[in-house]
Amino acid sequence: MEKLKIINNKNIEVWKFDFQKSKSNKLFNLVETGKKTATSYLFNNEKTINKFSYLTNYDCSKTILLETIMAFKCKFSEINAAMAELEGEGDFAYWKKEHKKFFSSELKHEEFNEDVKIIFEIFKVVKIC
């Protein structure tokens, strides 16, 4: 596992969970209520992570300012139950099943395997806007 540098960039990223509306809003609500304090996504060769970002719900009517506390580049297989619990979406078996499906759909030209590199990002809510 490689710890990534977090930078305080003036250009704050605005993002949402990239799913259908109900799933996107469900994940947004988990963040809003403090049950979800981490997220994971495919590694894309960036070595730095923005310190602050705005998370929106699906239709961008609600926004949360997040501060990234820590970020790691790791293999899917290196995620453990404690890390998965921070994502707030269910137990470890559920996390593995759902994220394997998600990462499989995100991979364009390769097949999913447990060595796929991902970013695991831990954050805290700064402000609900």
Image (spheres, grey):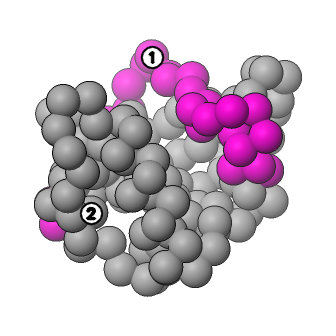
The residue indicated by pointer 2 is 76
**Drawn side of residue 88 relative to residue 10, left or right:** right
What amino acid is at disc 2? Phe
- Within 10 Å of disc 1 (Cα), the crowding (few <14, some 14-19, many 20+) is few
What amino acid is at disc 1? Asn
Tell me where residue 57 sits by quadrant.
top right
Depth check: give the residue in front, 89 or 66. 89
Q: In the rendered image of this protein, does residue 69 appear above or below residue 129?
A: below
Q: In the rendered image of this protein, does residue 29 appear above or below residue 109?
A: below
The residue indicated by pointer 1 is 11
Q: Secondary structure at mark 1?
A: loop
Depth check: give the residue in front, 94 or 53. 94
Tell me where residue 127 sits by quadrant.
top right
* Pair 1/2: label in front: 2
Q: Residue at coordinates 58% horizontally, 80% vertically from top-left?
A: 91
**Drawn side of residue 36 relative to residue 62, left or right:** left
Depth check: give the residue in front, 25 or 112. 112
Tell me the quadrant of the picture where the C terminus can be found.
top right
Depth check: give the residue in front, 97 or 16. 97
**Drawn side of residue 59 relative to residue 46, left or right:** right
Could you give the CA–CA distance between mark 1 and mark 2, rounded to whole angstroms? Answer: 29 Å
Q: Secondary structure at mark 2?
A: helix
Tell me the quadrant of the picture where the N terminus can be found.
bottom left
Q: In the rendered image of this protein, does residue 67 appear above or below residue 54?
A: below
Residue 8 on the magenta span: yes
Q: Residue at coordinates 43% horizontally, 83% vertically from top-left?
A: 81
Give the residues in magenta: 1-29
Q: Residue at coordinates 51% horizontally, 60% vertically from top-left?
A: 98
Q: Position of residue 32 (x, y in %)?
A: 77, 51
